[in-house]
Image (cartoon, helix red, strand yellow):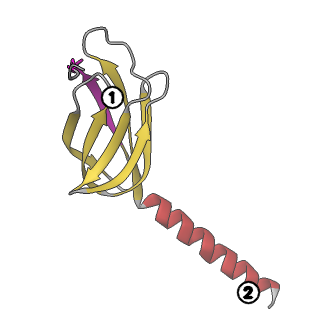
Amino acid sequence: MSVRSISRIVCLLLVTATTARAQSGTITGRVTDSTTSAPLSGATVTALTGTSTAGSATTGEDGTFRIVNLAAGTYVVSVRQLGYSERRVAGVRVDAGGTAQVNVTLVTTSTQLNPV
């Protein structure tokens, strides 16, 4: 195989990888407590398409999250955290090569345990 052939293959691979990356998008945001506005770390954020999970992330100490490599389309973003009611945000649109911003506020919920 000649150097010229190898160069062509490498260029083709780079163009393909760049094109694939440009066709996907990202959802980012922050999750906070509704009463105190404090960031919530450890919340699970999931991007859903129909009944399938397209991607998920866990919030960091500052309450931020980032879900990457999502196909362009419209998603429902679900946020769950122990001690809080689940929140769903419908109609989150992700464009190819773009980033959708979703900030979510969760409301505390009390859970009653069964007596022993």
Q: Give, as a three-letter code, the residue at label 1.
A: Gln
Q: Is residue 60 left or right of residue 53?
A: right
Q: Residue at x 77, y 85 (%)?
A: 4
Q: Residue at x 25, y 10 (%)?
A: 35
For the residues carrying marks 1 and 2, which lies nearer the camera in this image?
1
Q: Secondary structure at mark 1?
A: loop
x, y (%) of residue 64? 43, 28
The relative height of residue 26 versus residue 60 in the rendered view (above or below) is: below
Q: Is residue 24 in the magenta section? A: no
Which residue occupies the foreground of this view, 1 or 55? Answer: 55
State the extent of the magenta-drawn residues as a range: 100-112
> On the image, numbered disc 1 is attached to which residue?
81
- The number of callouts visible is 2
x, y (%) of residue 32? 33, 20
x, y (%) of residue 16? 54, 71
Mark 1 to mark 2 CA distance (whole Å): 53 Å
Q: Which mark is residue 5?
A: 2
x, y (%) of residue 91? 18, 45
Q: Give, as a three-letter code, the residue at label 2.
A: Ser
Disc 1 to disc 2: CB gap under 8 Å: no
Name the N-terminal-most of marks 1 and 2. 2
Split into 4 quadrants, where in the image is the C terminus?
A: top left
Split into 4 quadrants, where in the image is the N terminus?
A: bottom right
Q: Secondary structure at mark 2?
A: helix
Q: Residue at x 32, y 12 (%)?
A: 37
